[in-house]
Amino acid sequence: MGDTGRGAVAEFLGTFALIFIGAGSIVAATQGGGNGLVAIALAHGLVLFIMISIFGHISGGLFNPAISVALWVTGKLPSTKTVVFILAQLVGGIAGAFLLKFLVPTEMFKAAGGGGAAVMSGLAVGKAVLIEAVATFFLVLAVFGTAIDDRGPWNKTAGLTIGLTIAFDILAFGPFTGAAMNPARWLGPALATGKLDNWYVWIAGPVSGAIIAAVLYWGVFLRGTEPATP
């Protein structure tokens, strides 16, 4: 198995874990088995921290199609690998959601909406898209600042930094849109529950926010930092 194949397996497993644990924490919190929003934020942040620590050196630990697109736009991820990784991420997210659906009681799963993302009642869809874009913007800044920019020792903290960014985004924006920041995080539970309402919120928002953050970081902080050719 080549590097792309190994990377795809890592991306599948990491995204599977993110959705299985993240959505599972929402199901548990909805039933009183957790401490609400804080528990949900910590579950997402911790599982991402662990998965990046395990698989970061194999695939980059992306686990998010929006981040894959952002890396592709800035020339950090080849086209073929980008497509393969996105497919692995989407399939991993779907598998995680359906396994959760199979394991937990049906009524619990339904009551929690499968642990999926949803737009708060009364919130304009345009605002929901913007919330997802801003939340993902912060996430991708964390990715580029710690995992992509290799100057100094900061890349050693990438998993923790990115996990904490996910956590604070959920604490701030979770009640409004679910703070998915990730098309795969939305798609798995959406398919498992059959609820595809406002699907573009979790595609247009994360992808646009990710691209803006990536281009900004690359253009302002990375351009011209490569060593001169002897």
Image: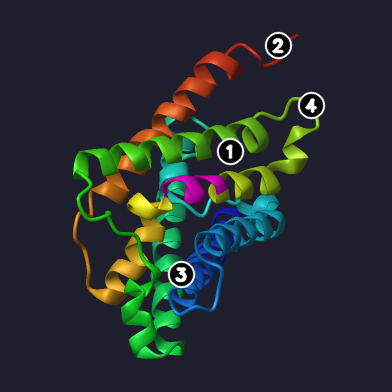
Residue pictured at 46% horizontal, 28% vertical: 213
Vertical arrangement, residue 63 with respect to residue 1, above or below = above
Q: Nearer the viewer, mark 3 or mark 1?
A: 3
The segment highlighted magenta reads 168-173
Labelled pair 4, 3 in contact (Cβ < 8 Å): no
Q: Amino acid at mark 1?
A: Val
- Looking at marks 4 and 1 on the same chain, the residue that comes earlier in the sequence is marked by 1
- Give the residue number, with chain letter if any, for mark 2: 229
Residue with the mark numbered 1: 143
Placement of the N terminus among the 4 image quadrants:
bottom right
Residue 116 relative to residue 54: left or right? left
Q: Position of residue 143 (x, y in %)?
A: 58, 38
Report the residue marked by disc 4.
152
In this rendering, does residue 196 appear at all?
yes
- The x, y position of residue 130, in whole percent, is 31, 36
Of residues 154 and 105, the one nearer the viewer is 105
Residue 227 shown left or right of residue 171 in the figure: right
